[in-house]
Image (cartoon, grey):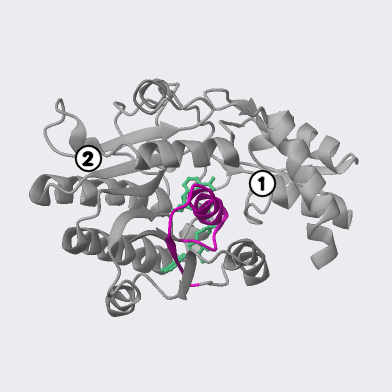
């Protein structure tokens, strides 16, 4: 018996795998260790898991259905937490093919696996990006999500539609989690807070898009992990009020912060003021995100706790004391 975690060498995936191991679960981790950002960081995360007897790892691409099936052959897969994806809004502008392979073909293969092995629950990562150009704030799960401004967002919205049809057709319990800008130690080097830290360390100016007129709902990693496990432990097929076992949840912080507050927080965490270059809005970006988390609060007992200032302080300490030593 084991729980399959895809994207186990990724930021969120490795913390989720660690939390599952800590509560005594057997975990099969899958990741293709691609070079979208430095694989050294993925290896660092895997090193946090590899000492655990209950953890098995397979380096494979979820777009390869045969390899995926082979990795779980002979295992009773009791649950799937699917976090592997090509992430990043900006990268999707020039590299859409990577998103088709990982997020569409790969997601389809995971749904097929779920259809075959019938785990108790399958949870997958969606994104706040599905809200695209939504003007109504805060963003609620009942809002329209048909207007995608990035191809990344379009693949995540497609993931929800694909999952919805599987839930209807095959009665497989599926839960999609719309994560809102997740950050923390061992996070993603392509995200703004990390790029700012890199620029400060190297004495370069940080790039501030839309002249700083942006806001994001930032969610610290430990809050996200709690939300993922809460959703995993509550398969929606137990809900009598749903016509089919598929549900999406916002996992955010319900506390949008201005981009300039992020900059100030990173400066404080790094102990240095940054030079700044103000630039226009980038293609594919949205001006703001803000999660309405009433549904997750009510149905998952989700209650994010960590403020941006606290989370950035933790990230900064890790970055200065551990990450820089690996460079
Ligand atoms: N971090 C955020 O702020 C955020 C926000 C919204 C949604 N998400 C979603 O959450 C999930 C996890 O994100 P993350 O921040 O941990 O990103 P990440 O890039 O750190 O983790 C994803 C992992 O999946 C692996 N992967 C990618 N394509 C693969 C494939 N075809 N086969 C096997 N492995 C593959 C990568 O190597 C990586 O280790 C993703 O689905 C992402 O789209 C993240």
| Magenta run includes residue 50 | no
On the rendered image, what quadrant is the C terminus found in?
bottom right
Seen from the viewer's position, the closer of residues 96 and 326 is 326
| Magenta run includes residue 28 | yes
Q: Find residue 278 and report its horizontal and vertical position in percent.
A: 74, 41
Q: Find residue 135 and report its horizontal and vertical position in percent.
A: 42, 25
Mark nearer the N terminus (2 vs 1)? 1
Residue 118 is drawn in which quadrant?
bottom left
On the rendered image, what quadrant is the N terminus found in?
bottom left
Residue 62 in the figure: left or right of residue 162: right
Q: Secondary structure at mark 2?
A: strand
Seen from the viewer's position, the closer of residues 135 and 99 is 99
Q: Which residues, given as a range, are shown in magenta?
A: 7-32
Q: Find residue 208 and report its horizontal and vertical position in percent.
A: 71, 41
Residue 313 in the figure: left or right of residue 117: right
Mark 1 CB lies closer than 8 A to ligand 1: no
- Residue 246 got which mark? 2
Residue 88 at least partly seen: no
Count the labels in the image.
Answer: 2
Residue 78 in the figure: left or right of residue 26: left
Q: Find residue 276 and report its horizontal and vertical position in percent.
A: 81, 42
Return the residue at label 1.
192
Task: Name the residue at 67% across, 54% down.
Answer: 186
């Amino acid at each position: 018996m084991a729980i399959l975690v895809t994207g186990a060498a990724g930021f969120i995936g490795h913390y989720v795998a660690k939390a599952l191991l800590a509560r005594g679960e057997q975990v099969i981790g899958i990741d293709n260790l691609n070079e979208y950002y430095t694989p050294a960081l993925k290896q660092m995360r895997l090193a946090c898991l590899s000492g655990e007897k209950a953890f098995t790892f397979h380096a494979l691409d979820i777009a390869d259905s045969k390899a995926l099936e082979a990795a779980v052959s002979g295992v009773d897969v009791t649950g799937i937490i699917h976090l592997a994806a090509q992430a990043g809004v900006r990268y999707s502008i020039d590299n859409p093919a990577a998103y088709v392979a990982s997020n569409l073909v790969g997601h389809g293969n995971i749904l097929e696996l779920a259809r075959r092995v019938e785990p108790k629950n399958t949870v997958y990562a969606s994104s706040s990006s599905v809200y695209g150009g939504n003007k109504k704030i805060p963003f609620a799960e009942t809002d329209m999500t048909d207007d995608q401004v990035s191809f990344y967002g379009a693949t995540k919205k497609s993931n929800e539609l694909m999952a919805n049809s599987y839930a209807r057709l095959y009665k497989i319990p599926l839960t999609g989690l719309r994560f809102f800008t997740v950050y923390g130690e061992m996070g993603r080097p392509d995200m703004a807070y990390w790029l700012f830290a890199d620029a400060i360390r190297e004495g370069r100016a940080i790039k501030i898009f839309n002249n700083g007129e942006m806001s994001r709902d930032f969610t610290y990693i430990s809050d996200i992990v709690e939300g993922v496990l809460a959703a995993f432990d509550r398969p929606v097929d137990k809900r009598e009020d749903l016509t089919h076992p598929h549900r999406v949840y916002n996992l955010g912080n319900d506390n949008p912060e201005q981009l300039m507050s992020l900059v100030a927080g990173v400066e404080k965490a790094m102990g240095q003021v940054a030079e700044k270059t103000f630039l226009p809005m980038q293609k594919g970006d949205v001006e703001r995100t803000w999660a309405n988390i009433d549904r997750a609060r009510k149905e998952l007992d989700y209650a994010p706790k960590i403020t941006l200032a606290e989370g950035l302080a933790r990230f900064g300490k890790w970055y200065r004391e551990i990450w820089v030593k690996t460079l």
